[in-house]
Image: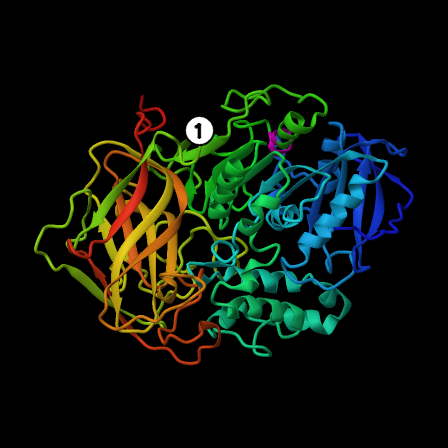
Amino acid sequence: MTVMESGAVAEEAEEIALPDGGSVWRRVVRTAMRDGTVLVADLYSPGRVLEARPVLLERTPYGRRARRESDGLDRHGEPVFPDRSAALFVARGYNVVRQDCRGRGDSEGRFVKYLGEAEDGFDTVEWIGAQPWCDGRVATTGVSYSAHVQTALAALSPRSLAAMFVDSGGFASAYEAGIRMGGAFELKQATWAYRHALNSPAAHRDPVVRASLQSQDLPAWFRAMPWRRGASPLRAVPEYEEYLLEQWEHGAFGEFWQRLGLFGRGSYDRFPDVPSLHMVSWYDPYVLTAVENFRALTEAKSSPAYLVVGPWTHGARSVRHSGDVDFGPRAVLDGNLAPDYWEFRARWFARHLGGDAPSGDAPSGDGAAAEDFPRVQYFLMGGGSGRRTAEGRLDHGGEWRTAATWPPQEATAVRLYLRQDGSLTEALPRDGADDRLEYDFDPANPVPTIGGQITSGEPVMRGGAFDQCPTDETFGCEPPYLPLAARPDVLVFQTEPLAEDVAIAGPVRVRLSVASSAPDTDFTVRLIDVHPPNADYPNGYAMNLTDGILRCRYRNSFASPEPMRPGTVYEITVTAPDTANLFARGHRIRLDVSSSNFPRFDVNPNTGGPEAAARRRVVAVNEVHLSPEHPSWLSVHVLSDGSGRGPGRG
């Protein structure tokens, strides 16, 4: 593959003064892609005169000079803006490039979310690698979309790529995590499209377009789904409306979902053999993506891959709480894995690219030193007091663990069977029983989303850990705000109060034996840690850990949907993203089974027709079978090395 001559022009460098009294030099570079579209970037260096160094590249659709919340805080709790962030890496021996993606910021072209980033990224990396101010090595870095673009460009095998720090993204398969899950459409794509259409070039150019977008009542539009072309809150920016609806309408896995930028799994053999780090959060949509990328590249490459998972929401590594749950002072990256996020990255890059030695004292936590960087660092949630903190959140606690593999070698898969009496037990269903539970699933009254692995969902939903009881802030709910467990369309299965601590770490799978009156319907699962009642929470606290969904027409293949036959029992597997949690003594392990989780996922109309164009819906009578012939079970990975003891319990 040949990169076209870029005709890049480096403008006059300017010295940027920093708040700490230092400075960094910045100049604008313009690089033509293979189709002639010019992308704009900032190049940071230690002085006016450029010298050959390794280059750190970040490509972003959010504005190369704009700070994002997921950029985090420094070790003093202060936000770090792009100029200062770049200066920190420049001081460590790198040049830094921050580029606006096509059709965003100052770059030319038309923005189509995710598509085109492979070619643009490849062209940019190879152009940088050929510049006299690069020593031939380009390392990529970035969060969320800036992670997706990294795995996209890696699929084209750029020769100059030297390392990847992939934080909270980088699609293994966007069809299975990030845009869709289990065949259902993740509606955070709709809220993201609306929020970023407001910041699109079209909205900046035309005040009428911006006014049209600002006048939309997004929660009201969520009550009027599915959207159609010309009948959506995005109608003033057709390019955003088009790409969103195109994603929504491609229900089956086919060529659309195997394109570059969406399907890293199909290109792992073409990824350069370079070190990679995959960071994610337990309450992030990209848990499955990060785990798969880590495991696949570990198996396929000789260069090391690393996995880091914290208890945060998307990119919130400097925050100790997620939703309404506090995970304690050890939860944050800062002061535990490194003094701060920048030091953490600098140490990792120094390990694999060279550069100046890390500065500052290393914290006492595992993996702090560059010479001792574990392959897996994960936060085991749990072990807190269960009381209310001064800030009004549940104290759940937790601690960092290290492992050589994921799931940890000391984790063993354990089945817990669902029983008709609502119990969850290792004992098999009794012989001769024909147990089943059934409920009506009404698409007009879906089970509401309360937290979970969500990002960019505001103002209709937000991610994190919450008590599974609606409030006046829960979308789609009205008084009285009873627990989700009180709904007739939610099946609840739970253990007895645990006699001893039980810690899990790894995949979560639910095998269900199901039937339905409809030709197609959904089944959802949600794993919950039930805290016992106390003075602060007299009704206990049902804390969500992870949840999944399966659209039943895809039970055998995402590529070849098959309708269900009424009354026929099918065995299906619902996958929920991995998690790690200590269920303390006296807690219960709980699994909720239902058929909707809205607005996190679109709602199945139960007609068997395409949900993105549905104009009618029907009530489905859904069954979960629990007999010896048709059992249903939850599979979790239990730590068996004494890890069941919670923090401070040893």
What count of labels does the image hold? 1
Q: Is residue 148 above or below residue 356?
A: below
Q: Amino acid at mark 1?
A: Ala
Residue 358 at x, y = what percent?
Answer: 66, 22
Q: Which residues are magenta?
A: 340-344
Q: Secondary structure at mark 1?
A: strand
* Location of residue 228 with respect to 38 vertically, above or below: below
Vertical relation: 252 (above or below) 360: below
Q: x and y percent of residue 92 in the render? A: 73, 27
Q: Are there few (<14), some (14-19), or many (20+) residues within 10 Å of tag 1?
A: some
- Residue bearing the label numbered 1: 403
Q: Does the magenta portion include 306?
A: no
Q: Is residue 554 left or right of residue 249?
A: left
Residue at (57%, 55%) from the top-left corner?
A: 262
Q: Quadrant of residue 48?
A: top right
Percent position of residue 66, x then y: 71, 48
Residue 137 visible somewhere in the drawing: yes
* Image side of residue 646 versus residue 363, left or right: left
